[in-house]
Image: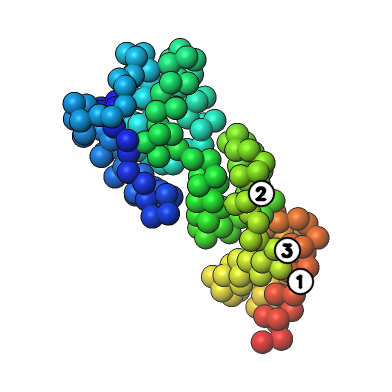
Amino acid sequence: MAAQERGPSGPGGRLDADQLRSAVDAVQSRASSTSDLPPLAPEAHEAASAALRLLRYRPRSEHELRERLLSKEHEPRAVDEALERIRIWGLIDDADFASEWVRGRRRRRGRSRGALERELREKGVAETHIAGAVAGIEESDDRNQAAELVRGRLARKPAAIGPGADIQGEKRRLVAFLARRGYPTGLAMSVVNAELAAQASG
């Protein structure tokens, strides 16, 4: 690893998972002799190398990265030095991490705003970064997304609302389905009732 090199940034300074892997590769392949940064202490160099290996798998919050390095018995001082260098390389930024987490989990898993906030707190992201990441999600957005999830589910199970179907049982299953994605019970029930009624009338 080139322990002294400054890593590349993605567009706007934000790195998605693929860009992050490329950035890690670039940092690891650079020759230390071209560095404009002082060498890391040996222990910090080891911690930084371990951190880069972790970042190859997926982006992580600083808290996640710190906890993983400490769990691997790297000294706290070495971890601090390694994380400071990785920040300089542009490979960790909790504000960007939170934004990318919200975008990806919203798109791929349909998570509600509340669920995303809880997930980011569990990853040790500061409230200011969490607030910024979810700022664009309104209650109406959650309702629309929940409706899309229900419509998609019903489209894959047309028999669920056909003749002789257990409508009450399907309601419970759909409400539970939304609850697992973080939608409040009241909103989930309202959306499910509306979508089942729309399907029945259609």
Residue in the picture at 38% in, 18% down: 44
Q: Residue furthest bottom?
A: 202
**Any mark on residue 139, and which?**
3
On residue 193, the disc is 1
Q: Where in the figure is residue 118, as x and y percent of width and height?
A: 66, 43
Which amino acid is tagged 2? Answer: Ala
Residue on which disc 2 sits:
131
Q: Measured from the top left, where is residue 140 in percent x and y?
A: 71, 68
Instruction: Tell me the amino acid under the disc marked 3.
Output: Glu
Percent position of residue 35, x then y: 25, 29
Say whether residue 190 is visible.
yes
Residue at 37 percent across and 50 percent down: it is 10
Which numbered disc, 2 or 3, marks the residue closer to the eye? Answer: 2
Q: Quadrant of the N terminus?
A: top left
Tag of residue 106:
none
Mark 1 or mark 3: which is in front? 3
Give coordinates of residue 31: x percent, y percent. Answer: 19, 30
What is the crowding at mark 3: few (fewer than 14 residues within 10 Å), some, or many (at least 20)?
few
Quadrant containing the C terminus is bottom right
Q: Is residue 48 left or right of residue 71?
A: left
Label 2 SS: helix
